[in-house]
Image (cartoon, helix red, strand yellow):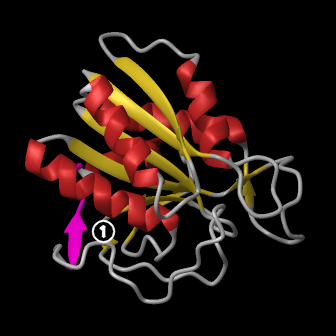
C-alpha cells in the first residue's frame, strides 16, 4: 500500500507545527509492505488544496492521511467530516481571512471520511493514547483542505482521513496553560493508523 502523509507548515507566531514534526519523524521510519510519501502543505485556503492535488497525482496513493495542529486540543482527534465552509477568526499565511464563504459553491454540503474510524480508534486506545473521534474539523484551512481531499478521494476510491494533533511538549511559542502531548506518542498513534489501514 502507498500512503501519502501530509503536515502543515508553521503559522501564526509559532516556528513549528506539530503536524509537520510528526510527519517528518514518520518519514524516517520503515513500514513493512507500505510505502509512505510525505508532503508539506501551506497554511493557505487558496494554495493547500492545489499542493495536495498535485501530490496525489504524483504519488498515486491508496490512502491519504492528513495531519493538522489543533491548538489547545487535549487528545488526538480523528476527524469524521469536512464542511463546505470557510470562516476564519485570523488570517492564513497569505493574509486571507474568509467569512462564511463556501469552499465549492456547487459542491456537497459535507463529505464524510471513508476510513474505518472506530477500528482505528480502538487500536490507538489499546496503547492508552488519548484520542477521540471528532465531528467538527473547524472551518479553517484544515477543514478546507480536508473537504477538497475527500471530494477527490471518495470519487477515486482512495481512503482519506484527517487527524488533528495537540501542541507537543517543548514547542516554542505556545500560549501558557495549553494542553500538550509528547511528540513520540503522537508519532506512535500515526504509525498505528497506518498499520491499521
Q: Can residue 37 be seen at all in this image of the molecule?
A: yes
84 lies above or below 196? below
Q: As drawn, is 91 to the left or to the right of 81? A: right
Instruction: Say left or right for 196 vs 76.
Output: left
- Quarter occupied by residue 60: top left
Q: Is residue 110 magenta?
A: yes
In the shown orientation, is residue 137 left or right of residue 23?
A: left
> Which is nearer the eye, 159 or 54?
54
Q: What percent of the width, then of the height, locates residue 6? A: 48, 39
**Front in this rendered view, residue 162 or 143:** 143
Label 1's element?
strand
Tell me the quarter of the picture where residue 136 sits.
Answer: bottom left
According to the picture, the residue beneath numbered tag 1 turns out to be 81
Instruction: Please report the residue visible at 33 percent of the width from the left and 81 percent of the height from the top.
Output: 102
- Is residue 127 visible to the viewer in this orientation of the structure? no
For the point 63% across and 63% down, which residue is it? 94
Q: Position of residue 163 (x, y in %)?
A: 46, 53
Above or below residue 57? Residue 85 is: below
> Where residue 56 sits: x, y (%)?
30, 35
Q: Report x, y in % for residue 31.
A: 41, 15
Up-down: is 8 above or below 143? above
- Dot 1 surroundings within 10 Å: few (below 14), some, or many (20 or more)? many
Q: Give the residue at x 24% y 56%.
A: 150
Q: Which residues are magenta?
A: 109-115
Amino acid at each position: 500500500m502507498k500512503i501519502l502523509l501530509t503536515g502543515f507548515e508553521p503559522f501564526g507566531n509559532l516556528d513549528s507545527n506539530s503536524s509537520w514534526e510528526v510527519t517528518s519523524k514518520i518519514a524516517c521510519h520503515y513500514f513493512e509492505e507500505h510505502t509512505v510519501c510525505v508532503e508539506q502543505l501551506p497554511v493557505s485556503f487558496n494554495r493547500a488544496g492545489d499542493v495536495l492535488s498535485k501530490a496525489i497525482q504524483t504519488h498515486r496513493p491508496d490512502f491519504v492521511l492528513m495531519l493538522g495542529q489543533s491548538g489547545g486540543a487535549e487528545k488526538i482527534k480523528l476527524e469524521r467530516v469536512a464542511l463546505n465552509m470557510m470562516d476564519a477568526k485570523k488570517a492564513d499565511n497569505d493574509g486571507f481571512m474568509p467569512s462564511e464563504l463556501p469552499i465549492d459553491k456547487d459542491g456537497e454540503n459535507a463529505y464524510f471520511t471513508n476510513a474505518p474510524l472506530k477500528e482505528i480508534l480502538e487500536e490507538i486506545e489499546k496503547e492508552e493514547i488519548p484520542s477521540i473521534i471528532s465531528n467538527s474539523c473547524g472551518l479553517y484551512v484544515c477543514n478546507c483542505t480536508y473537504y477538497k481531499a475527500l471530494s477527490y478521494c471518495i470519487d477515486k476510491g482512495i481512503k482519506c482521513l484527517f487527524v488533528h494533533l495537540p501542541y507537543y511538549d517543548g514547542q516554542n511559542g505556545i500560549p501558557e496553560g495549553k494542553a500538550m502531548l509528547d511528540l513520540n506518542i503522537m508519532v506512535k498513534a500515526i504509525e498505528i493508523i497506518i498499520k491499521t489501514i
